[in-house]
Image (cartoon, helix red, strand yellow):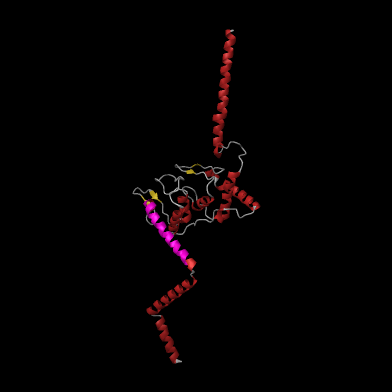
Amino acid sequence: MRILNLTAGRLSRHRRGPIAGALLLLLGLVTAGGLWTAVMTPASAEKTQDLASQVEEGRKLFLVGCSTCHGTNGEGITTDRGNNLGPSLVGVGAAAVDFQVGTGRMPMAQPGAQAPRKEVAYSEEETAALAAFVATLGPGPAIPDESDYSIEGLDSAAQEAAIVRGGQLFLTNCTACHNFEGSGGAMPRGGYAPKIRGVEPKYIYEALLTGPQTMPTFSNGNLTPDEKRDVIAYLGSLDDAAAIGGFTMGGLGPVAEGLFAWVVGIGALVGFAVWIAAHTTRSNKKKVEA
């Protein structure tokens, strides 16, 4: 019994030694590496390698085309006067890059109140590489899949219900800036809400996720993924809807309609009244001369 106690005491002292801790750590690393090698399939290993090469390609593109404003590590750059030359991209996610670069808003020709949509500067592969690199800077929204913003997989009744729900959500949350039919409108400080009719569904979904420029961010806590999909379905239905009111004047709303009524409608009536008065005056002169 005494021998067993002595042996247990020696083992206990060795377990508390610094070498024992290092050996246990080494044993844990070897075990974890062996399990990872056993589980890791050739296909997944190749996918990981492709992602790493894509990130590296994105980093090279970022340093050439984006680092001037956003910093070499996406940390953002502030001028000597305290102005924000380029915001930090840490945590914006791949979706923000795919939206800004995929719609041509980035890179900007020069800083301004808002980045307008223009011709795309990067190919789809380059855009994907830039998005993959920025995604490594911090966790953020990923690029959505087509199933996230499309109702094609639903039956006709479910599609109609989604469009109705989307219309209600759009009228509640979006019309103040984008107009009642998505034609856009002016915003303070030189900004504007762009027209969202005819915009690709993926970019609308990404805009809702990331909140570009002055647009608020509609996270999944504000609008669920299904609600975002329904809003996009409603906007798509507007392109197929007939203009029941006739001439829509760009769908700019009552201000444009009132201006049209005053300038064209009342202007035509005033002109017609002047014409009648002028002809009446000539008729009276002829009678007096006779």
Residue 1 seen anywhere in this rendered image of the structure: yes
Where residue 101 appears, as percent x and y from the top left, is 45, 51
Residue sitting at x 55%, y 48%: 173
Residue 60: in magenta span: yes
Where residue 174 appears, as percent x and y from the top left, is 54, 46
Residue 17 vertical position relative to residue 180 in the rendered view, above or below: below
Q: What type of secondary structure mainly makes up the magenta span?
A: helix
Q: Which of 244 and 37 is in front in this view?
A: 37
In which quarter of the view is residue 53 placed? bottom left
User: Which residue ends up furthest to the left in the rendered image?
Assistant: 80
* Start-end of magenta stretch: 45-68
User: Which residue ends up furthest to the right in the rendered image?
Assistant: 157
Q: Quadrant of the C terminus?
A: top right
In which quarter of the view is residue 21 placed? bottom left
Residue 195: in magenta span: no
How many numbered marks have been drawn onto this rendered protein structure?
0
Q: Nearer the viewer, residue 160 or 221?
A: 160
Residue 73 vertical position relative to residue 36 in the rendered view, above or below: above
Where residue 270 appears, as percent x and y from the top left, is 56, 24
